[in-house]
Structure formats: structure tokens, C-alpha cells
Amino acid sequence: MYARSNILEQIASNLYQGEDEVVVDLVQQALDQEMSPAEVLNGGLIAGMDEVGKDFKAGDLFVPEVLIAARAMHAGMNILRPLLAESDVPTAGKYVIGTVQGDLHDIGKNLVKMMLEGAGFETVDLGTDVRPDAFVAAVREHQPQLLGMSALLTTTMPGMKATIEGLEEAGLRDTVKIMVGGAPLTAAFAEQIGADAYAPDAASAVDVARDLTA
Ligand code: B1M
């Protein structure tokens, strides 16, 4: 049993190391000590994922380690999610994400999603091979602050522009900020198609999402 002051640090550090069972145990201990779910989320899980993001960006952590840390984050979130829903704690923002039409690559997209969840965003994952009209329908239905599109093939990148045009036609473009990413993309391409931002990696996606919702 850890002292109240130490327990959040322990959650963050065990999350970083991917110790999902320990994270679950510590989250429960923190709640038993009457810490609020928001305190445990922000001071423990999000703090841990922030460290993961920093070290991933710096090249000190690699994809498998990030995935293992994200698994520990999800294990802790499974306990907190119902409590957060009850206590009406505002999320950092709602984020709809998907890989564009014709493209089945989802490893990077999933990593972006996990890092965003680790930063407190509520995500709606549309999966892969998402048609422009499906992105538009999801924006209409979920009314997110952010829409993220991923593409790994040069041949599927035009799906991003088609989606932005679809949002314009539907009168929804001004309701949502658009972030794009994926290995073949550049900031210049993002600007050219009228997206609000480009993120080169999953950790940067969190920084960009925070900037866009600030
Ligand atoms: Co594909 N594939 N693939 N592939 N594949 C690439 C992308 C390719 C570069 C390989 C090559 O030729 N060197 C090439 C694309 C060439 C091009 O267009 N420039 C290619 C090709 C050609 C193909 C097929 C056409 C092959 C074929 O069938 N002839 C085919 C297409 C299928 C389809 O999509 N319709 C195909 C299929 C596949 C598999 C199914 C076998 C598999 C995908 C499995 C899966 O995703 N579930 C696969 C894989 C694994 C790859 C490589 C090897 C790895 C991609 C990956 O997961 N990287 C890839 C070569 C390579 O990159 N070395 C290749 C790891 C991942 C963490 O990085 O996705 O870049 P990445 O994501 C990063 C950032 O880009 C960024 O953050 C992530 C984490 O930091 N990011 C975002 C990504 N999305 C973001 C969104 C954001 C922000 C940041 O905001 C919304």
C-alpha cells in the first residue's frame, strides 16, 4: 500500500513500464483512498502517457513499448471510465479518427488514438478504409472538436481532400478542426488540402490536438 502522495507517481511509472496489472491495482488503491477519478486520470494515467509520448518523440522508446504502455493505460481506464462518466468530468475533447478510403494501414492510426486517449481525449474510431461520406456522417453524428485522418499510401491521400470538400458541402467544415498524418504526408500537403494541422507522429498528435482545442 502506497502513501497517498506517492501513489500517482507509482501509477505513472508503472504505466510507463507497461505493468498493466500493477496499474489496475494502484488505480483501485487510489480510489480506495478517496482520490477522485479525475485526480487519478490526470495525475496518474495521463502523466504516465505524457512521459511515454516525450520519450517516443525523442526516439528513446519504440512502437512496441508504446503499445505496451497504452495497454496498461487502457487497463487503468477500464476502472475509471464508468466513474468518470458518473461524475461528469469533462474530457479533453472528442476526437473522431480513421484511415482513409482504400487504405488498410492502421498501426500508426491506432497509436495516435491510444496516445490521444492517454491524454484524456474521448475517441471515436471509424477504423480503416473510411469513405469521405462516412467521415462526414461521423462528424454530423458525434459532433467532435477534432477529426483525424491517417493515410499510408500516396494513392489514398486524395481521400483526405475529398473528405474536407464533403464537410464543406455539408456545411460542417467550421464545426471541426482537422488533423492529418501518416508516413507519406507533409505539413505542406496538409496546408494544400485545407486541413488545420499535420502531426508527424503520435506524440506530436497529442500536442497538436491540445493546441487545436486550447
Ligand atoms: Co503497406 N505499404 N501496403 N502494409 N506497409 C507501406 C506503407 C509502404 C511504404 C511499404 C513500401 O513499399 N516501402 C508502401 C506504400 C508506398 C506508398 O504509397 N508510398 C505500402 C504498400 C505499397 C502496401 C500495399 C499496396 C502492398 C501490396 O499489396 N502490394 C498494401 C496496401 C493495402 C491497403 O492498404 N489497401 C499494403 C499492405 C500492408 C499490410 C496489410 C501488409 C500491413 C498493414 C497492417 C496494418 O496496418 N494493420 C502493411 C505494413 C505494416 C506496412 C509498413 C511495413 C509499416 C507501416 C506501419 O505500420 N508503420 C509500411 C512500410 C514502412 O512504413 N516502413 C508499408 C508503423 C507505424 C507506427 O508508423 O503508420 O507511419 P506509421 O504511423 C506513424 C506516423 O505516420 C504518424 O504517427 C504514427 C506513429 O508515430 N501517423 C499519424 C499516422 N497516422 C497519423 C494520423 C495523425 C497523426 C499522425 O493524425 C490523424
Image: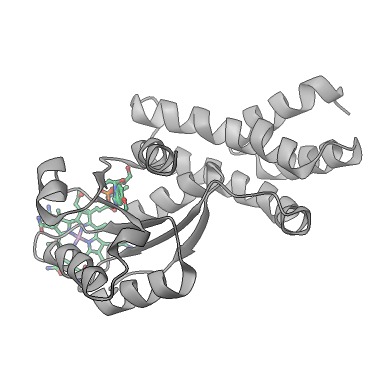
Rendering quarter of residue 136: bottom left
Image coordinates for residue 80, horizontal then vertical, percent: 73, 51
- Ligand 1 rendered quadrant: bottom left
Indicate whether 43 appears above or below 120: above
> Quick check: 123 left or right of 56?
right
Image coordinates for residue 206, horizontal then vertical, percent: 42, 40
Please give the name of the residue rendered at 72% of the width and 45% of the height, measured from the top-left corner. Answer: 21
Please give the name of the residue rendered at 24% of the width and 74% of the height, measured from the top-left corner. Answer: 132
Whether residue 140 is visible: yes
Please give the name of the residue rendered at 16% of the width and 54% of the height, measured from the top-left corner. Answer: 194
Q: Nearer the viewer, residue 84 or 61?
A: 84
> Quick check: 23 left or right of 72?
right
Image coordinates for residue 208, horizontal then vertical, percent: 35, 39
Rendering quarter of residue 174: bottom left
Indicate whether 69 appears above or below 5: below
Please give the name of the residue rendered at 19% of the width and 48% of the height, measured from the top-left corner. Answer: 183
Rendering quarter of residue 105: bottom left
How is this picture coloured?
one colour
Image coordinates for residue 214, horizontal then vertical, percent: 44, 38
Indicate whether 16 appears above or below 67: above
For the N terminus, give its image quadrant: top right
> Quick check: 179 left or right of 162?
right
Total marks drawn? 0
Whether residue 103 is visible: no
Q: Nearer the viewer, residue 142 or 54?
A: 142
Q: Nearer the viewer, residue 110 or 122?
A: 122
